[in-house]
C-alpha cells in the first residue's frame, strides 16, 4: 500500500464521507465495502458510517486510503471502474443537494444556453467543495475546454503513481455535469499530485459527446 494514511490535517464533512461509502456499498455490495475498509485499516467505519452532518471530521487520508484499497484489491482497471462508478453514484446520492449546486436544478437555470449551464455548473461544484470542505477547487476557461482544478485533493492524498488516479473525482464531475446540463461531456484528468504535479486538474471539453 501507499503512505496514503499519513495525516493530512484536512477534512471532508462527515456527510461527504458517508455519501461516498454508501455509493461504494451500492456499487460493490456491503461485503465488498467491508473488505475495502479492512484493507484500508479503517475497521472503525464498518457498519458505522460517519454521521449525516457537515462537521469537518472525515480525513483526506481516509478517503485516499479507500481509493488506494480499490486499486490494490481489484487491480488498476477494476479499481478505476469501481471508483468512477462510486464517484458518479456519490453525486446522485446526495452531493447534488449541497450548497451552490442546488441552484443548478432551478427551472430558470434549465432554460439557459447549454454553454452557460456548463460554465455555471462547474463553478457551482467548485464553490461547493471549497465552501463545505478543505478541498480547494476552482475553474479556468480555455477556448475549447474548461479546466477544473483541485489544489488540495483528497482522492490521491499521500498516494504515488506514474499516471493520474483521481477516478472518483472524474466520476463525480461526469455525473454533476450531466445532471446540470442534460448532456454528457468528456472529462480527462491531465495533472495529478500523485505523479508529482502541483495540482490535480481535469479538462472538460466544451463540445458534448452526443
Image: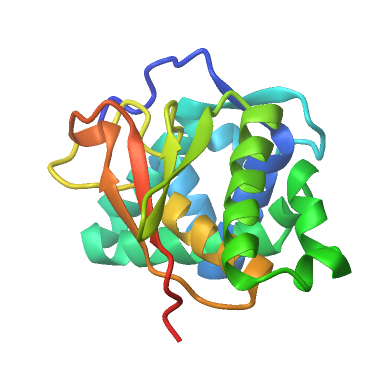
Identify the residue at the far bottom of this view.
210
Q: Which quadrant does the N terminus fall into?
A: top left
In the rendered picture of this protein, how many numbered marks are placed on residues? Answer: 0
Q: Position of residue 82 (x, y in %)?
A: 42, 64
On the rendered image, what quadrant is the C terminus found in? bottom left
Which color scheme did the rendering employ for the protein?
Answer: rainbow
Residue 21 position, x and y percent, is 60, 50
Please identify the quarter of the rendering in which residue 96 is found: bottom right
| Residue drawn at x 67%, y 46% as measured from the top left | 124
| Front-lying residue, 159 or 105 | 105
- Compare residues 7 and 181 and report the one nearer the observer: 181
* Residue 188 image position (x, y, % from top left): 32, 58
Vertical order, 59 against 121 (above or below): above
- Viewer-nearest residue: 42 or 106: 106
Q: Front-most of 177 and 32? A: 177
* Residue 150 makes an appearance in the image: yes
Q: Which residue ends up furthest to the left in the rendered image?
A: 162
| Residue 52 horizontal/vertical position (percent) | 81, 40
Residue ID at (64%, 58%): 91
Question: Visible in this render: residue 29?
Answer: no
> In the rendered view, would you say 175 is above or below 209?
above
In the image, taking residue 51 as reference, residue 150 lies left or right, namely: left
Q: Is residue 163 left or right of residue 55?
A: left
Amino acid at each position: 500500500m501507499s503512505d496514503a494514511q499519513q495525516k493530512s490535517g484536512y477534512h471532508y464533512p462527515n456527510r461527504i464521507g458517508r455519501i461516498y461509502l454508501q455509493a461504494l456499498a451500492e456499487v460493490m455490495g456491503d461485503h465488498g465495502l467491508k473488505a475495502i475498509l479492512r484493507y484500508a485499516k479503517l475497521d472503525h467505519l464498518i457498519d458505522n458510517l460517519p454521521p449525516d452532518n457537515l462537521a469537518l471530521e472525515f480525513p483526506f487520508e481516509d478517503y485516499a486510503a479507500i481509493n488506494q484499497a480499490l486499486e490494490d484489491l481489484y487491480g488498476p482497471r477494476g479499481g478505476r471502474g469501481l471508483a468512477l462508478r462510486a464517484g458518479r453514484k456519490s453525486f446522485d446520492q446526495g452531493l447534488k443537494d449541497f450548497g451552490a449546486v442546488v441552484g443548478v436544478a432551478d427551472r430558470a437555470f434549465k432554460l439557459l444556453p447549454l454553454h452557460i449551464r456548463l460554465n455555471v455548473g462547474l463553478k457551482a461544484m467548485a464553490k461547493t467543495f471549497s465552501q463545505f470542505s478543505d478541498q480547494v477547487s476552482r475553474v479556468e476557461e480555455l477556448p475549447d475546454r474548461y479546466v477544473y482544478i483541485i489544489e488540495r485533493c483528497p482522492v490521491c492524498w499521500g498516494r504515488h503513481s506514474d499516471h493520474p488516479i483521481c477516478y472518483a473525482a472524474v466520476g463525480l464531475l461526469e455525473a454533476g455535469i450531466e445532471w446540470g446540463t442534460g448532456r454528457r461531456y468528456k472529462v480527462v484528468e491531465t495533472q495529478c499530485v500523485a505523479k508529482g504535479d502541483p495540482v490535480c486538474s481535469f479538462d472538460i471539453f466544451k463540445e458534448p459527446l452526443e
